[in-house]
Amino acid sequence: MKKIDFDLKNNPFYDFQSSRYTMSARVNVEKLWKFSKENDCSFFILSLGCLINATNSVANLKRRIIDDEAVEYDYLEGVTPIMNEELKIYREMKVKTPQEFSNILDWHDYVKELSDEILSGENEGFTLDMMKRDYTNIANFSCIPWVDFDMITSCETKGRQIQPLITWGKVNENHEMSVSITVNHIFVMGRDLAYFFENAQNEFDSF
């Protein structure tokens, strides 16, 4: 984490009651979908990896406000809910970035093992008060695989919440998938979101 030269006080969105906003768009996931099926990999896990990489590729998405100063993290790890529908178990896990592993498949196996440990009770998973999450180098990722949605809104803990919230949905018959991202206008403009979606598409195409 480093402090950055950013004029918060004169930012036009700084004193808004809430400067959060959301954008949704569709990405084509055909290559990753087929790769997952052919290689017996979790599409959910590999999608998570693609979206973590896309988030970390945009510097403005890694910015926060701490002690009334603008800072930028070197990277954001991913926090995501996981569940076992049969046992009605719902937990959260925090995962490292794919860059910390030699390849995406090694990262996939690490996430799969961690998920299994949490759902079996061997690992308690991720726990952190919601109000403290904005001061941690994490982004929140959530999958709703049952719904091919067009848009979604997200909860807020406070008006100046900065942490990015990324949600993705069901893959439709054209191998398109909605991805939604909620950000704060203090740091993130439309062009930054264009970079995010462009980089997300590149990540899904890399398979």
Image: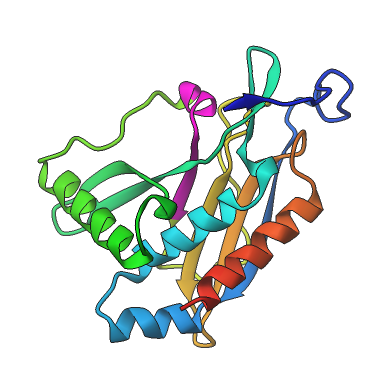
Given residues 92 and 103, the one toward you in this image is 103
Magenta segment: does it hold 89? Answer: no
Measured along the vertical axis of the image, is residue 175 above or below residue 89? below
Q: Quadrant of the N terminus?
A: top right
Q: Is 16 on the left-hand or right-hand side of 71?
A: right
Q: Within the image, what quadrant is residue 12 found in?
A: top right
In the current view of this chain or complex, which residue is farthest to the top? 67
Q: Is 38 on the left-hand or right-hand side of 129?
A: left
Measured along the vertical axis of the image, is residue 45 above or below residue 61? below
Q: Is 129 on the left-hand or right-hand side of 3?
A: left
Residue 23 location, x and y as percent?
69, 55
- How many numbered discs sit on the rendered protein? 0
Q: Within the image, what quadrant is residue 66 found in?
A: top right
Residue 151 location, x and y as percent?
63, 60
Q: Is 97 on the left-hand or right-hand side of 67?
A: left
Q: Is residue 152 visible?
A: no
Q: Is residue 146 visible?
A: yes
Residue 133 location, x and y as percent?
48, 28
Residue at (89%, 21%) from the top-left corner? 10
| Colour theme | rainbow
Magenta segment: does it hold 132? Answer: yes
Provide the residue span drawn in magenta. Answer: 131-142
Q: Within the image, what quadrant is residue 126 found in?
A: top left
Given residues 177 and 190, the one toward you in this image is 190
Residue at (42%, 49%) from the top-left corner? 97
Residue at (31%, 30%) from the top-left corner? 127
Residue at (75%, 36%) from the top-left corner? 187
